Amino acid sequence: MRNTTKSYLDFRYLDKNLAIFVRHVTKKPIWYMRARVGKQYITESLGTVDDAEAITEARQRFYKLQDRHKQNIPLKDITFSQFWTLWYERQLQRGDWQQDRINWHKNYARRYCIPYFGKYLLNDITPDVVDGYWGWRKSYWKVGGAGEKDRGKFGNAAETPSSKTLKMEQSAIRQILSNAHQRRMLPFLPAVKVPEKDRRETARRPSFDDMEYNVLTTQLYHWSRGAGIWKNNKLHELHLKQRLTIRFLVLFMANTGMRVGEVMQMRWEDVKKFIDTDDETKLEIRVRADTKKGKTRAVISQPNAVRYLEEVRSISNHTEPQDFVFCANKGSRLSDPNKTFKKFMLEVPYKGRDKGILCDADGDRRSLTSLRHYYATKRLELNDAKLDIVAGNMGTGIVQLHKHYLHSDHVRRSDELTANTKKGKKSKQAEEKIAQNILELAKEGNLDLAMKLLKGFSTVDSDKNKASN
């Protein structure tokens, strides 16, 4: 149906919900379409002066709009920020996320993801836009960076994000953009990858040396009692109870090697005492399936962990089987123990360092996870367990132990490094132990790990032969 009015040079209905028209006030007689889809009206330029082309284009667009409406997809191109809100709400409705993950995504979006990507329309997110994120993110907290003005509010935020942090952010961005692409709201899916130079896959994990750990535990003792440099008349009983809980959490983690999330999920029914063959009382802890690895495992603690857990029980009002072991005053999980621990380390006086004991000698920031690294380092330094046993107890792999925790092994074995070929008894014993680990892995069916360990062993053996020649 063709019609001419004061507003339109030409107006035609193609369907009761679709029309094309040419406006009077235009230099060129460009055709437009107006469509009703659901309860929305969409008006768009068809970009042509030919009526036949306009009709074909209008129908194609109308069918696409109807398809989007059926799939509950916004009819118009939306910004990243708008899509993130829709995506986040869908994830919550699915109910797959633990509270820690919910909090992480919410905080990450608020602080980094939305400030950078939020203003872009999805169609405008190109590979260059994605690649630009990493430089923006790395400089965020530095002088002149986007977050410089908020530095005082987030004193615990690392000035330079760690490799692990960047990989987590990479994963989040991939999830969001992939979801937009699957819903046909993002025509081209750009690659999302942390630049190789920033990933540092084999970088050692920040831990504590013996002196630092001694300072840490000594100051924790005084801090938890509000004594010494931590004396404060404003501290009340609840404050001190919270500090004691954090102190025992730190000591417990250093004596079990468990992940932060695993400890936070731990309930009293997951813990039981037993007497080992060496007549020492230890703990057997069941790690729940709803933690990082998604499967259960048993963790055997160091003997000291027994006492620390008894101390926690003595100050807690929530000791029923289903209660969280490390909990707030009302029984809920501790909200952000990592933040409290970092703030404490920042204020510990140590060798005149501006950031106390928060950073190691290389400037890498520590966190509660550093206690897991301390546990692994000590177990391997003391040589009191085989690699596969330590790996199994920690819920990780032998290759990971080699990559991240054997950085001080050359110091412990300095006598072997300096021994001549006639005095290589200890070196030979060490080689035999590695060979035994490889055989045990192969027998258990862990052929991939066995081959990786064998490859590393062969490289060392080859280098040693070259050196002796």
Image (cartoon, rainbow, N blue to C red):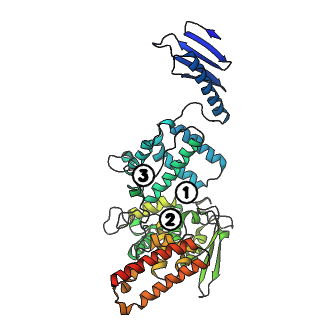
Q: Quadrant of the N terminus?
A: top right
The outermost residue toward the bottom is 422
Dot label at residue 335: 1
- The answer to which quarter of the image holds residue 395 is bottom right
Marks 1 and 2 in Cβ contact (< 8 Å): no
Is label 2 or label 3 in front?
A: 3
Dot 2 alpha-carbon crowd within 10 angstroms: few under 14, some 14 to 19, many 20 or more: many
Marks 1 and 2, the one that precedes in the sequence: 2
The answer to whether 184 is drawn above or below residue 111 in the figure is above
Which residue is nearer to you in this view: 331 or 90?
90
Residue ID at (48%, 45%): 113
Q: What residue is pinned by disc 3? A: 154
- The answer to which quarter of the image holds residue 351 is bottom left
Q: From the top left corner, tell me how far across and down residue 143 is, in percent.
A: 32, 49
Whether residue 456 is visible here, answered yes or no, is yes
Q: From the top left corner, tell me how far across and down residue 176 is, in percent.
A: 55, 45
Is label 1 or label 2 in front?
A: 1
CA distance separating discs 1 and 3: 16 Å
**Label 2: element kind:** helix
Residue ID at (41%, 75%): 214
**Label 3: element kind:** loop
Q: From the top left corner, tell me how far across and down residue 211 is, in percent.
A: 38, 75
Dot label at residue 243: 2
Whether residue 303 is visible here, answered yes or no, is no
Q: From the top left corner, tell me how far across and down residue 346 is, in percent.
A: 39, 62
**Label 1: element kind:** loop
CA distance separating discs 1 and 2: 13 Å
**Label 2 amino acid?**
Arg
**Label 3 amino acid?**
Phe
The answer to whether 60 is drawn above or below residue 86 in the figure is above
